[in-house]
Image: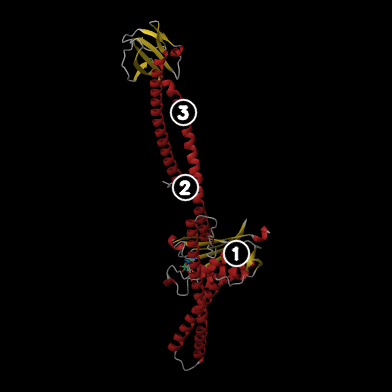
Amino acid sequence: MKRLSLKWRLVILHTIVMTLVMVFVLTLLFSISSKEISANVKSELQDRVSESFDYISIKNGAVIFDKDFLEIKDGIYLSAYDGDDLDLLYGKIPYGFHYDLGFLKDDIREIKAGDVNYYVLDSDVILSDGQKLTVRGIVSIDAAQREYALTLRIALILLPLLFFLTIVSGYILSKRALDPVEKIIKKTDDIRREKDLSKRINLENTSEEISRLANTFDSLLADVEKGFEREKRFSSDVAHELRTPITVIKMACDDLLKRDDLDQDMKEDLETIKRKNDQMAKMIEKLLLLARAEQGRYKLHKHDFDLSKLAMIIGEEFKVLGKERGIEVVTLITPAVRMYGDEDLLERLLSNVLDNALKYTRSSGKIILKIDRDKDIKIEVVDTGIGMEKSQLEKIFDRFYQVDSSRNDSGSGLGLSFVKWITDVHGGKIDVQSEKNKGTTFTFTFKDQIAEK
Ligand code: ADP
């Protein structure tokens, strides 16, 4: 299963934390305000009942109620009863409330009538003539809570909206935080793909940590680049230094071979030394050329040339060489395929690949050299030789890599690295298909720059 990206993990974490905080804060707020409302209603009820005592007086031996007693202030209904009886003397009670509810003095009770909850407070008042009345205050809790319920409903509607905003803000925040990391990944990937160690990440205007990470990468790249440069210079220096002793050995061998006091054994040994020395000279030449090429010191001479003609000439040479070894070399060349490139290098490319095909094909085998053009220019070298394992295919372009150095003593493992470099500087692509003991096909594809012009 694909792992969730850090960006989305941060969004999810941010949303969970923010939602928990929101739910906690809202729950706390509502539980506090619910208690606060109850306490307020109770205290208003108490005040109103105490205040109502002033509305009752005795006039000419009769109990007189002020009209304020009937007023429903803050939703509180007042009613007065004769002593401990439940005989209503004056006042109002809410519609549907119990007429026969017994008294419980000076204690606020919660009573349900129908679907409505009420607070009820009964208090005695002693009038100026010593008569005792009971005043009852009734207030609906639900009415007071209604406003609070409305706020709660609004909050519940707002919650999904806040949830959505949390996701969006989390996404924007994590994207902003991780965008520079994406940039570093993209740039390092570009450097890896283009194999251009001179490039740097160069990230500006970013946070301190990310900029430190980018700078560390850049220093690492600089170190790796220096290392590669040193290695290239070393190969080219060594190859250069070896040229003189090799020339001296060659000259000394030639001089010695001219002498007539040598016996047959000595002559054969000298021939072997000379042959191996020539082989070494060729290898050093290739190494020097490759080192120069990789250092960018090889000057390309690109021009428009007839690739078909060049392939025809090389093909003829290899037909002769093939015949000597009992191998049939066939050319299937579309005439007049022109290419814009370094003719010299293309000649080396063809010779190297054909040389390998000859080296690794047994007698009575077959080699085909094909030149073709549709949209792109295509060079194909097919052989029926010993082939290679799949695992070896990706290494054959490395310098000094040989599948089995014992199977040819003239190889150096440099030929295909050079072929790869030539293909690269011409913007081409190489495809190798090979099967053990069946054969190998090298296909080179180049953009037709002349047709594109
Ligand atoms: P070498 O000088 O050893 O031929 P190259 O760089 O030209 O070096 O080739 C690298 C290795 O790839 C060779 O050692 C050989 O094992 C393998 N190889 C190249 N071309 C072929 C081919 N046509 N058939 C089989 N193996 C091949």
- Mark 2 residue type: Lys
| Mark pair 1, 3: CA separation | 74 Å
Instruction: Please give the label number shown on residue 198.
Output: none
1 vs 2, front mark: 2
* 240 left or right, relative to 97: right
Residue 349 drawn above or below residue 30: below
Q: Give 423 or 369, whichever is nearer the viewer.
A: 423
Instruction: Please give the label number shown on residue 7.
Output: 2
Helix, strand or loop status at disc 1: loop
- The numbered mark, 1 or 3, whose residue comes first in the sequence reads 3
Query: Residue under circle 3?
Result: 151
- Callout 2: 10 Å neighbours few (<14), some, many (20+)? some
Q: Quadrant of the C terminus?
A: bottom right
1 vs 3, front mark: 3
Instruction: Please give the label number shown on residue 426.
Output: 1
Helix, strand or loop status at disc 3: helix
- Mark 1 residue type: His
